[in-house]
Image: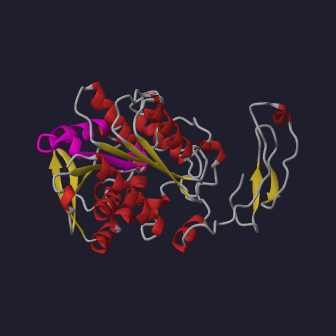
Amino acid sequence: MTREPASTLSAVTCGCLTPVLLATTLLALSPCACSQNSDVRNIPARTLPTPTTVSPAMQAEISKSWDGSTKPEHLTTQQWKAQIQKENEPEAASVDPMLKQFHVSLQQSKIAGVPVFLLKPETIAPQNRNRVLLHVHGGGYVVFAGKAATPEGILMAHYGQIEVISIDYRMPPDFPFPAAVDDAVAVWKEVIRTHAPASVGLFGTSAGGGLTLATVLRLKELHLPLPGALMAGTPWTDLSETGDSYFTNEYVDNVLGSYRGSLEADAKLYAGSHNLKEPLLSPIYGDVSGFPPTILLSGTRDLFLSNTVRMHQKLLQAHVRANLLVFEGQSHAQYLIVDDAPESADAFHEVAAFFDQNLAK
């Protein structure tokens, strides 16, 4: 399956087929031995038109091709740090303009010794005066430290008219799992000293969505009070390459592209010596009974669509109130990436309404 301009040629392979060059018009793959395998189904190469069912702002993002690589990454610690800095810098540079655009203030602080950012909108809704949201950022558990952690929290503070505490949790290569979970739990324990747990929400996208769910699993293990509600946006609930959309949306998702390459490297760097399917790494394998009401977000082209719908189903099976929003045409977390699209405003308004319905006042 390819997602490139029709003028290009793509190398298309199946498990036992020698790579051949195919134009990305509809072409049938040549038969091969694996086509007789009931575990494998070949499909034609094809082009994917940009959907006309989304806003122009979202169309512009959806039309882009993925420019990543599926080559295995074997980086030294110094190479990891250089790559992380390169990705952090433009994200951090976007923060001050966002604060101005969305009328949110930012204050750096520490809670339980963990660096945090206190994000306050210009107007806090009356029903939210005693509420707060804790935010754990995405970035594959590897990137977006410091101010780069805050864009999603800024948007949530603005659209939800609520105070947000964005947690700048420790990350690899210096601090692999379970440092991120430990930091989120430490902040949670301190925040509920001054706030009723039922009035505090927890949220994040991508790795932040996975960390949101993992944190609640850890709180259950520690027999601590749980948040009043959760948002897990396109959560990385399975760090192993398990789930249909890892394959059906490979190359279709123009944000993540493929599990192979940097995403797999991030997973292994974060997990360290731990099994990728441990529940605090991959919450889909945890016991979610008794979880707070949870809203989950994804998109039809999202590589993590299966991560999201599998978790939604698991929550429902555990009799947890769980809402699922799947956005037309969107790849991974594009409701967050294209912050000026109407679909992005819709997403955050839906999440804000969910928190309002489920958090104690």
Q: Residue furthest front?
A: 357
**Residue 40 locus on image (x, y percent):** 75, 35
* The image quarter in which residue 193 lies: top left
On the picture, is 25 further left or further right than 336?
right
Q: Residue furthest right?
A: 31
On the picture, is 71 further left or further right than 360?
right
Q: Residue furthest left?
A: 194
**Residue 273 locus on image (x, y percent):** 42, 28
Query: Which of the two residues, 281 or 69, is positioned nearer the viewer here?
Result: 281
Does 202 lie within the magenta span?
Answer: yes
What residue is shown at x 77% (from left), y 42% (from top)? 14
**Residue 44 locus on image (x, y percent):** 80, 51
Residue 119 to residue 169: above or below: below
What residue is shown at x 40% (from left), y 39% (from top)? 321
Q: Which residues are magenta?
A: 181-209
- Residue 114 visible to an observer of this rendering: yes
Residue 19 to residue 86: above or below: above
Residue 244 to residue 128: above or below: above
Query: Which of the two residues, 250 or 265, is positioned nearer the viewer here?
Result: 250
- Residue 178 visible to an observer of this rendering: no
On the picture, is 7 further left or further right than 96?
right
Does 104 lie within the magenta span?
Answer: no
What residue is shown at x 57% (from left), y 37% (from top)? 241
